[in-house]
Image: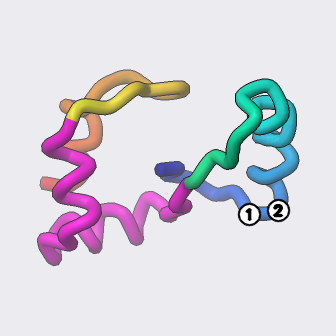
């Protein structure tokens, strides 16, 4: 999951090397910060699952920061 302002085309280019090295697809969902906050406020199943489950952060800090933005 990507929260920010990036297009799928831009992200695909950035992930191309990682995909090749891993020899597999990398699935992602892109949300603007406002969309993410809105969906969390609406109790969106996907967003709430992500907030509850264990994550590996590539860039960013921790789950508490995400939860704060949603409150």
Asked if the residues shown at circle 2 and circle 1 are in contact, with their CB atoms under 8 angstroms apart, the answer is yes
Was residue 7 drawn as part of the magenta stretch in this picture?
no
Magenta: main secondary structure: helix
Name the residue: 38% across, 22% down. 61
Q: Position of residue 46 (x, y in %)?
A: 27, 64
Residue 39 lies left or right of residue 36; in this view the side is left
Q: Position of residue 66 (x, y in %)?
A: 27, 42
At mark 2, the secondary structure is helix
At mark 1, the secondary structure is loop
In the picture of the structure, the residue carrying the numbered disc 1 is 7
In the picture of the structure, the residue carrying the numbered disc 2 is 9
Name the residue: 30% across, 25% down. 62
User: Badge 2, how many Cα within 10 Å: few under 14, some, many 20+?
Assistant: few
Instruction: Determine which quarter of the picture holds residue 17.
Output: top right
Q: Position of residue 70 (x, y in %)?
A: 20, 55
In front of the other: 12 or 60: 12
In front of the other: 23 or 16: 23
Residues under labels 2 and 1: Cα distance?
Answer: 5 Å
Name the residue: 53% across, 27% down. 59
Instruction: Report the magenta residues as a range.
Output: 28-53
The numbered dot on residue 58 is: none
Was residue 29 drawn as part of the magenta stretch in this picture?
yes
């Amino acid at each position: 999951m990507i929260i920010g302002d990036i297009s799928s085309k831009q992200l695909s280019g950035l992930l191309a090397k990682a995909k090749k090295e891993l020899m597999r697809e990398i699935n992602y969902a892109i949300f603007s910060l406002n969309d993410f906050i809105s969906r969390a406020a609406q109790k969106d199943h996907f967003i709430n699952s992500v907030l509850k489950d264990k994550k590996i952060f590539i860039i960013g800090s921790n789950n508490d920061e995400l939860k704060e933005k949603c409150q």
